[in-house]
Image (tube, helix red, strand yellow):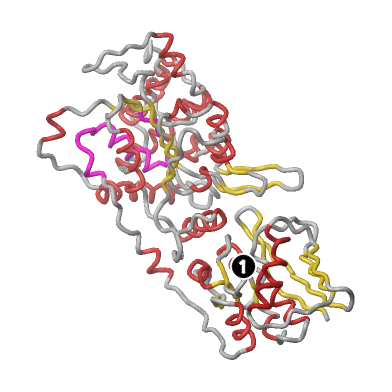
Amino acid sequence: MLARIRSAAVLGIDAYPVDVEVDITNGLPSFSTVGLPHGAVKEGRERVSAALANAGFSFPLRRITVNLAPADIRKDGSAFDLPIALGILVASGQLPEDRLQDQVIIGEVGLEGDLRPVRGALSMALAARTAHYRGVLLPQANLSEASVVEGLDVCGARTLLEACAHLSGNPAIAPTRVDIAALMANRGTDESDFGDVRSQAAAKRALEVAAAGGHNILLIGAPGAGKTMLARRLPTILPSMSLEEALETTKIHSVAGTLPPGQSLLTQRPFRAPHHTISDAGLIGGGSSPRPGEVSLAHGGVLFLDELPEFRRNVLEVLRQPLEDGVVTLSRAAMSLTYPARFMLAAAMNPCPCGYFGDSLHRCSCGPLAIERYRSRISGPLLDRIDIHLEVPAVAYGDLVGEQSDEVSAVVRGRVEQARAVQRARFRGQRGVYANAHMSARDLRRHCRLSAAVEAVLRQAVTRLGLSARAYHRVLKIARTIADLAGAAELSTAHVSEAIQYRSLDRKTQFA
């Protein structure tokens, strides 16, 4: 007898429908899986046979063939365990098939028949809705993330027996609903706050500009100046996530297996801080079974690279394409996968190997050649893609111990939200452009018209600093953001002059 169970598989961060066809015929007892199964899919036959026997079902001692269609795409993961088990029960006449026709089934089974969570449940639920199925049956542990998909009956089961009882209608599991509006309104409480940072008014202003326009930023300063402390508070002033951003970010973390247990949506912007020993595959993604890397896990949030020159050169260079395009494309012999990677890069570095070049309180022990060699670990093309280069001075003792009232993150975030609202209105209808940092050359000509005075300031800066064309465009984008924060429709010389000050590494005398 033949049984057909609807399921789904993940490709990249999106999912596609898969038909699990189970055929049981007379012959020597065997269990074969076809349709390009790989890794955990092949091993699933051992889990399924043990689970059915331990759950009290009769495992047919006949020839069992399982086909995963479409058969020309490699399947990986343990999500096919439950549909294969149910398919065997239907094909052997132990379970009725009528309630399975409009259901997508996913889940891993344990040897005792318990159901365990799988990666990518949110993506599979979205694929089920797109394919116009009525519902999804999955492990209870995946219920919270899949239930955010509206227009779909999402049911969670703890065991194989419970899933079979639901499909038999005795008793049926009630679909789970979640309040999307309540989830989005619950931003959560930030453990860190801008108000914790003493002094550093110039650095706080630069971070506010970076957050308002989605600009990448590099903090340069002596050890202990507060670079890491500032960078870790950057997510607290970023605007709240939209539902579309939250869904896409949650899909990435679900596929990567980093979604916290029981959490439906990631409503706080991610902050990723990989160690400088990370490999290029860990940063960008990949592997034998491709997984999102740190740049994709930081999508919609901040990727913080502390001690930037300590990262290997080949690791830093792979950042250039996602910084420019906002996506990561992994090409393999059999397929090409694309992961979103629209993040803000925040990086920190010392001004020299010893860390005290330009410090008034400590003597620098590095010569000009050592300083230049240290700086050259970061290539010019990568520096060009970092909009803001900011020098962070050490904090004076009086500022550390004195009474000081600093702005908290909520106040700064209010100004950032207002600037982003202006940008959303400006770029309405443009796909993939929602902040000034994403403007193309055509957008710059349209939204950054230059007066004669502004053009003169820019001409002088390009001549003296030797700015590249990309750096020139970065200056215009930063100036547009500064104008948005000030509520100005046109760029002024003050806006452009402040933007030029944020390109400190373009000044050739910086490390001379």
Residue 201 counted in the magenta span? yes
Residue 334 location (% of width, % of height): 76, 47
Q: Quadrant of residue 493?
A: top left
> In which quadrant will I find the N terminus?
bottom right
The residue lying at 43 percent from left, 35 percent from top is 305
Q: Is residue 418 above or below residue 160?
A: above
Q: Is the residue marked by circle 1 packed among few (<14), some (14-19), or many (20+) residues within 10 Å?
A: many
Residue 246 location (% of width, % of height): 47, 58
Q: Quadrant of residue 29?
A: bottom right
Q: Which kind of residue does numbered mark 1 sit on?
A: Glu
Horizontal side of 384 relative to 78 (left or right) equals: left
**Under tag 1, what secondary structure?**
strand
Please name the residue that numbered disc 1 is placed on.
108
Horizontal side of 143 relative to 182 (left or right) equals: right
Q: Which residues are magenta?
A: 194-219
> In which quadrant will I find the C terminus?
top left
